[in-house]
Image (spheres, grey):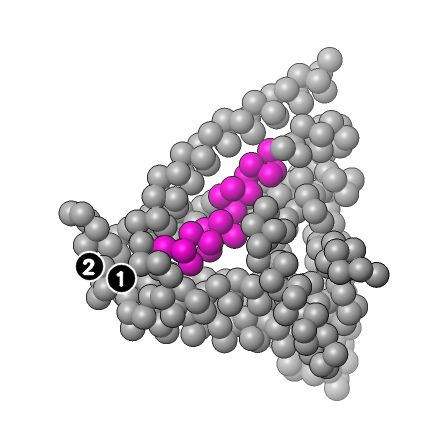
Amino acid sequence: MNWLTEYRSSLKNIHAEEFLDIYFFRPIAFIIIKIFYSLPLTPNHYSFFSLVSGLAAAFNFYVGQMALGAFFFFMFAVLDCCDGMQARMKKNGSEFGRFIDGLVDYTANIACYFALGFGVSKVYPMTGDIPTWYLVIAAGLSKALHSILYDHYLMEYMSYDRGDPGFVQKEIAEIRQKLAITKADPNGSKRRLFMLKAYLGFTSLQASKEAQPFKFDTRRYVEKNYRSIQLWGLIGPSWHMFFLIAAFLFSQPGVLFIYAIIFANLWMLAMLFYQRKINSELKQEALA
């Protein structure tokens, strides 16, 4: 198997990947995995390295070392791709891998934006007449909103693409079954019980983003939304991370604020209008 074929096999779903992930972050992650492929590393090891990089980024942002913080945030973004890719390439994923990956992702991102708010007040106290930490808060809240919307439409698209509106609900049912078995076992591991409960909570949150029972023809939905999901990806998490890295690596914080607060919010409004138009067309087709 050549490297290109192997790289493609490491991706979840080409439709579910953001442009920057496919052509920037994941190729670098793939090279890292190949370099250390012979070592007995698991996806959870990469999740741990990712968390360490994310916390290192947060620390450096907090103390005002913006360029170093941006470098570690870049390493976090790359290593965050490694765990899932490693699991698909080596078939050595763990039972709680998806939960650990999600927990690391949320922890590192929240820590970095909080630390960034404190750090910019030392290095860039004002942007024009506006305290810069106000803009960091606005950028962080914008990223959170854009990620929620992107995840919602991505989950909906994947449900239609798979022809299964409840694949996350099936995962929840499996976790509950494992939880019941572990509770019934008098010798059951308390650590495993805790992890199952936490995983159930995490997956239940994911289920809230899942598509409702299909309203439209699955084939037509996928055809009409293929371009839409790519366009939603322009305000997905990877672009926010890329602009944060570029802004503070090159000491141009305004780059992040222009993208996250102005461009991305205008793009979000345009995409909501476009998505409404697509859904209206699908409804008309369903009634015809």
Give the residue displayed 67% in from the left and 73% down from the top.
35
On screen, 8 above or below 111? above
Q: Main secondary structure of the magenta part?
A: helix
Disc 1 is placed on an element classified as helix
Residue located farthest toward the front when viewing the structure as drawn = 2
Residue 285 seen by the camera: yes
Query: x and y percent of residue 225 in the render?
Result: 65, 32
Q: Which stretch appears magenta?
A: 228-247
Disc 2 is placed on an element classified as loop
Query: x and y percent of residue 121 in the render?
Result: 22, 62
> Would you name the residue on which mark 2 appears?
125
Q: Which mark is residue 120?
A: 1
Q: Quick one: label 2 or label 1, which is nearer the N terminus?
A: 1
Which sits in the foreground, 187 or 258? Answer: 258
Q: Identify the amino acid type marked 2.
A: Pro
Residue 202 seen by the camera: no
How many numbered tags mark residues here? 2
Query: x and y percent of residue 71 in the render?
Result: 44, 67
On screen, 13 above or below 82? above
Give the residue displayed 75% in from the left and 60% down from the top.
3
Q: CA distance from mark 2 to mark 1?
A: 6 Å
Asked if disc 2 and disc 1 are in contact, CB closer than 8 Å, the reply is: yes
Which sits in the foreground, 167 or 138? Answer: 138
Residue 40, magenta (yes or no)? no
